[in-house]
Image: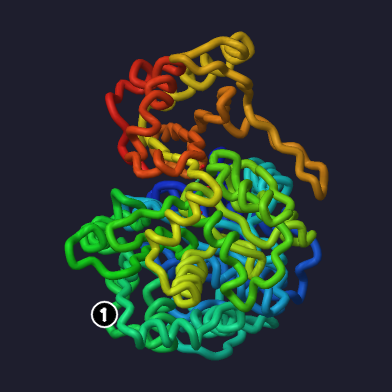
Amino acid sequence: MSIKTVATTAFDDQKPGTSGLRKRTPDFLRPHYVENFIQSTFDSLEGFAGKTLVVGGDGRYGNRQAIQTIVKMAAANGFGKVLVGQGGWLSTPAASCVIRKYGAFGGFVLSASHNPGGPNADFGIKYNIGNGGPAPEKVTEAIYAHSKTITEYKITDAADIDLDRCGNSQIGNTVVEVIDPVNDYAELMKQLFDFEAIRALFKSGFRMRFDAMHAITGPYAKVIIEQQLGAPVGTVINGIPSEDFNNGHPDPNLTYAEELVAEMFSANAPDFGAASDGDGDRNMILGNNFFVTPSDSLALIAANAKCAPGYQNITGIARSMPTSAASDRVAAALGLECFETPTGWKFFGNLMDADRVTLCGEESFGTGSNHVREKDGLWAVLFWLNILAARKESVEAIVREHWAKYGRNFYSRHDYEGVDSAGANTLMSDLEAKMPALIGTALNGMTIAYADNFSYTDPIDGSVSTKQGLRIGFEDGSRIVFRLSGTGTQGATLRLYVERFEADSAQHVQDTQAALANLIQTADDVAGIKRHTGRTEPTVIT
Ligand code: G16
């Protein structure tokens, strides 16, 4: 085995977005593209000689090839050990778990998350630091800076490792260990939740459907839900990961998880339904003919945290800015700190490391806690199972009771996917320009209390993140928020977030879109969505 130094030319498009570098697969297949990004990452880090690197991904097209490259480059760059999930598999939360458990220096997670996979779909690479969480902005900015000037990378000429067999092999001085991708994660879940109570729930005839959407959570859900918790075989559907998610779109929402949604909204629906995304960090929670918004799910989990043995003492709750304020109400009632961060799980890391928050959540179907430093789809599902096992009520009854107690934050997100970037950028810049003059004026009968571009100062390290979304808040507490997605790979995706608080429980039966109709109309009036995007309606409504 020898180490080769390979001359390369920099690419100018390796800027990590909301969650790592995500692009079309053909972009990653360009010669040296993966190598440049990996070397730029190594060149941005210090002190990893002899340390451990974790590598795994969601099994999508390109996963195995990228892993072979990363392993050989890690050896050439001086890592002492590389831990790789068998088959190249590690869900995003499992990768975070493994990094933390084995005190690794960091890890690479290969995934484009909820985006489709395949030779003509999407791929992604994300670097996570030693706390198990996505690299903070100062690291991703350093990676980007290196990627623009890189001239060479290091790689060994070793043979490919056998990804399918657990065990150790050696590349020069570097040990490569292929590990079971599920064990460490399943072990952690057992420590957090009351498995006995959940087993009893399934024994009592409780019916559940978990849709793994042909993605990475399948193997985890089969082991934990079917084998360890005793749910009948067949509870987990679409449980075998496929390189292109069976030609599907592994995004667990009401639009893309259509098989699950059809069953959960049928006459003979199971008691509980859930789905997870491409890399296993997102979740959708459904009851019998009932949808729980991710924002409500976070609030519900917080309010019922004591049902789970691992959550007897929660310190605080954090949510991303566009996420509804439902969890703020729970935090206030429980006397907990609560934080509003920009979109991106990486912003929760410092708060969790400092033990200021235990639970975090985002409207984008992400919920999690300080057990790892990623959001965790299956964790959220197990938390709900634990709550259902403890309370022995239906999902709908639990949510309605919560609304009656705390009030209901009617909430919806409208996505305009793949719109023309120029039009989307103009929409945002025009709106931002007129914001100062909007304050104090009335729109469709509602007076604007504030209008700004959200900026966040991290309370732990003082770092400032600006331009995180345009917010218009009204005097009655309602608000509309506009953001351009940082995870899309084609054109631009405009996200409109709409929220209205309703204290009166007699009004909670209203349909969400109807309850928000005036705000949705106002958003178009003020921002000219139709005019700028050329679209008459959103691609996805959640
Ligand atoms: C990623 C981030 C999340 C973010 C989501 C949507 O999730 O980790 O924090 O909320 O993208 O971001 P955007 O609105 O910019 O598209 P995932 O599941 O894609 O890793």
Quarter of the image with the C terminus is: top left
Which residue is at 61% across, 73% downward? 97
Taking the image as shown, residue 350 lies to the left or right of residue 208, namely: right
The answer, for residue 452, to whether it is visible in the render is yes
Which residue is at 39% across, 36% downward? 414
As rendered, which of 189 and 384 lies closer to the eye? Answer: 384
Residue 376, image x, y percentages: 53, 64
Residue 525, picture quadrant: top left
On screen, residue 494 above or below 273: above
Residue 307, picture quadrant: bottom right
Which residue is at 68% across, 42% downward? 145
Provide the residue designation for mark 1. Answer: 234
Q: Residue lying farthest left?
A: 267
Residue 49, image x, y percentages: 77, 71
Taking the image as shown, residue 253 lies to the left or right of residue 18, namely: left
Which residue is at 40% across, 41% downward? 506
As rendered, which of 186 and 154 lies closer to the eye? Answer: 186
Quarter of the image with the N terminus is: bottom right
Taking the image as shown, residue 106 lies to the left or right of residue 179, namely: right
Residue 378, image x, y percentages: 47, 69
Residue 314, image x, y percentages: 70, 64
The answer, for residue 176, to whether it is visible in the render is no
Query: Mark 1 is on which residue type?
Result: Gly
